[in-house]
Amino acid sequence: MHELRKDPLMNRWIAVMSDSMPPGEYHLQEEEAKESECILCSGREKETPPEITAIRGNGSNPNEPGWLARVIPSFKPILHVEGDLGRRGVGMYDRMNSIGANEIIIETPEHNKSTEFERMIRVVSLYKERIADLEKDLRLRYILIYKNSGREAGAVYSHPHSQLIATPIIPRRIKEELDGAKQYYSYKERCIFCDIIREELRYGQRVIFETKKFIAFCPYAQRSSFEFRIIPKRHSCAFQEINSEEIEDLALMLSAMLKKLGAILKNPPYNYVIHTAPNMIPRRDHWHTLGEDFHWHIEVMPRLTRVSGFEWGSGFYVITTSPEDAAKYLREA
Amino acid sequence: MHELRKDPLMNRWIAVMSDSMPPGEYHLQEEEAKESECILCSGREKETPPEITAIRGNGSNPNEPGWLARVIPSFKPILHVEGDLGRRGVGMYDRMNSIGANEIIIETPEHNKSTEFERMIRVVSLYKERIADLEKDLRLRYILIYKNSGREAGAVYSHPHSQLIATPIIPRRIKEELDGAKQYYSYKERCIFCDIIREELRYGQRVIFETKKFIAFCPYAQRSSFEFRIIPKRHSCAFQEINSEEIEDLALMLSAMLKKLGAILKNPPYNYVIHTAPNMIPRRDHWHTLGEDFHWHIEVMPRLTRVSGFEWGSGFYVITTSPEDAAKYLREA
């Protein structure tokens, strides 16, 4: 079985696969599967693991064509639902079993359709449904939804899809955000994200697009040029508390912003992630503040440059197009 | 002038260039310059910025051929030596001037020579000389030495070279290591790195290579398969305190390890970084512990897979070849 290990210096958990890949099998230039070989397309349902849920047209049956959006377990999961956590020490180090879930959200039955407004409503609804279902499992601490689009952004399939990973730990990057938000809250007694929304709306030059319920902007200090955030105006720590009006509004926002990004950067590889609050157990631990000091949001990052030893070794980034200019290009697209 | 900005949530500083690059100028597939066009080769000294220091053969003059290793300022520096820090607030955010230095350490006059033992002694000596010189500037808080080898690892030149960046802030990744080491020290009253060295030597299966003064091993929980660390057995927080016997020993270790890496992974793109203690000012601040709780080391990472939205958004990594197996492959190469 795969295992999770903790870096004692960085307090970072990572997963180590049990069946080690030999050095000759690493190929950085590996291609995505062609359309004719795509296993996520409609018509190949019997070749995927059985579906977890789907949004289907009238009268169609599970694991048969007729779906509009579909969720399946990963073909090669890193984390598994069965078993206990098995936390224990190994010499001076710490490990646990790789409990959790990996799922693929197939956004459309057709291979070459982009995820436009109507389709995006289904996708966002499935995100909500899967988080709400998985958070009932008390072994799981965090559910991360993310999207890889394009080979350079780590996508294995060229078919429109997002992914979900549910982990028995709070991933380090999330923990850092929670800690940062808590620190700000304890000093200011206000949510840092609510303050950022007000500051960005006041200043205006980094705002790209505004809907009734959401705002998209380039952050003041970002990690990558043309990176942007989408954030709900209503304070809420948990993505799954999104209501139906907000689902429609977010679908509009997300599809419009991805279209803008594609237009000015010629369909670049990109990633997005939803950063929501951790699951039940830690939320109960921090009951007195966590709901107030954290605010869910989406981070979208086009992959325009390569991470060098400098960024990797320092966590310091160089932005070649200022957030103000990037916002202007995106606003006008 | 370029500026440094701070992310208020993550406490991360980044640099924003003053002359924004338009979206059409991003090309992920850009090629490295060919050998015939290489500006770092011997014979083109007049076309580079004037050299800062060099190791030269008998009788040769600065900025002329005859050098064995050479340090020059970057062609397009992100940070500049002139000026004051100019720390101030902008609305709710924080910024400062981009004070600092960017340098290129050219490791050999010939384009296609790898950095073997004799050459590596010169390179390591220049690392020491540059850090020792720059740390005298009291505006600078940190000096990072790193190497990008191969286009996929962010290298702009194919000529053997390393880089240096001196910053007026402690980069986030370094701060995290300092904090982690301090936390361990305050609990155990021992250096975590010294403990890791003892644990790895006791267990043995992750050790790759041992010299009189250094040990190379795959860490228990790493961020990338085949990543390894090189660490001095003698406790020392600052790289520049390395003595001449250790310089020779490190040159032997580093050239042998890079040869092993090249052999088993067919000359993969890779990065390395030297993590040393911050400069004078913060060292004086933490005088009572910092010298004891931090231990300089080198992190070497081959670039075998692409970072996806998952790693980028979570800080959680999946290792496809276990550290124990990776160490075995490297040990036997």
Image (spheres, coloured by chain):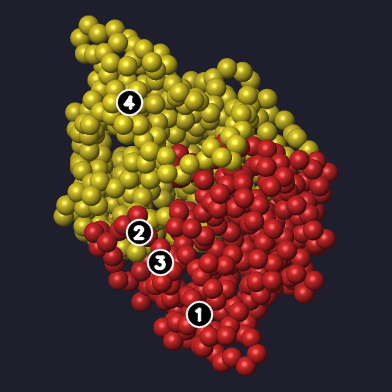
Chain colours: A yellow, B red
Cα gap from disc 3 to disc 1, whole angstroms: 15 Å
Q: Report the chain holding disc 3.
A: B
Cα gap from disc 1 to disc 2, whole angstroms: 24 Å
Question: For this rendering, which residue is in front, B307 or B9?
Answer: B307
Q: Which residue is mark 4?
A: A37
Question: For this rendering, which residue is in front, A33 or A293?
Answer: A33
Q: Can you tell which of label 3 and label 4 is closer to the viewer?
A: 3
Residue type beneath disc 4? Glu
Residue B281 visible: no
Tag of residue A234: none
Q: Residues within 10 Å of mark 4 (few under 14, many from 20)?
A: few
Q: Residues within 10 Å of mark 3 (few under 14, many from 20)?
A: few
Q: Are marks 3 and 2 in contact (CB under 8 Å)?
A: no
Tag of residue B30: 2
Residue name at image x 62 percent, y 50 percent:
B263
Residue A35 position within the rendered picture, expressed as x and y whole percent measured from the top left: 28, 29
Does residue B85 sit above or below A72 in this rendering?
Answer: below
Residue name at image x 58 percent, y 59 percent:
B272
Secondary element type, mark 2: loop
Q: Residues within 10 Å of mark 2 (few under 14, many from 20)?
A: few
Q: Report the chain holding disc 1.
A: B
Residue type beneath disc 3? Lys
The part of the image, by quadrant, that contains residue B44 is bottom left
Residue type beneath disc 1? Ser
- Give the side of residue A165 with respect to residue B122, left or right: left
Cα gap from disc 3 to disc 2, whole angstroms: 12 Å
Q: Report the chain holding disc 4.
A: A
Does residue A61 sit above or below B169 in this rendering?
Answer: above
Q: Which residue is mark 3?
A: B34
Q: Earlier in the sequence, mark 3 or mark 1?
A: 3
